Image (cartoon, grey):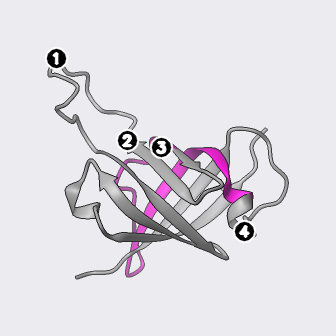
Amino acid sequence: MNRSALYFAVGLVLPVTGAVAQSSNDLTGAWSLVSLVEDHGGKLEHPFGEQPNGMINYDRNGMVMVFIASNNRPKSSDRPTVPVGPSVAYYGTYALDGNNLTAHVKGSTYPNFEGTDQKGVIAIMATT
């Protein structure tokens, strides 16, 4: 299985000071997704496009909820239970070690994520 690094760049809904989370408590809250990049051996890919749409919520009890979608998905007349375009949502618990984030996925719109650890590196950018 090809392992890839996942990089999140997120902007907090409210302005923050500092550039990098130091603990799980620094990560607590609702965050807007700014960028999602996968590094496949030096080849960078944007699986949800250059400007994905998404929110990530980390709570004080170690729970995480994630929604990520491409910002150019077409409208659909199908029922909302039929996914359209690149998107994923999942929930579970999380652990932060420096900038290394691990989400322990309990449930997901992508069943292959369920029961797995999704690992990535997180960068936090202050917004105004």
Residue drawn at 47 percent across, 56 percent down: 36
75 in relation to 54, above or below? above
Task: State which quadrant residue 113 falls in.
Answer: bottom left
Q: Are marks 4 and 1 in contact (CB under 8 Å)?
A: no
Q: What residue type is labelled 2?
A: Ala
Q: Earlier in the sequence, mark 4 or mark 1?
A: 4
Q: Is mark 1 on a helix, strand or loop?
A: loop
Q: What stretch is highlighted in magenta?
A: 26-55
Q: Which residue lies furthest to the top in this view?
A: 77
Residue 77's label in the rendered image is 1
Image quarter in which the C terminus is found: top right
The foreground one among 127 and 29 is: 29
The foreground one among 58 and 1 is: 58
Q: Report the residue marked by disc 3.
A: 51
Q: Residues under labels 4 and 1: Cα distance?
A: 43 Å
Residue drawn at 71 percent across, 54 percent down: 125
Q: Report the residue marked by disc 4.
A: 23
Q: Which amino acid does label 1 sit on?
A: Ser
Left or right: 46 with respect to 97?
left
Q: Earlier in the sequence, mark 2 or mark 3?
A: 3
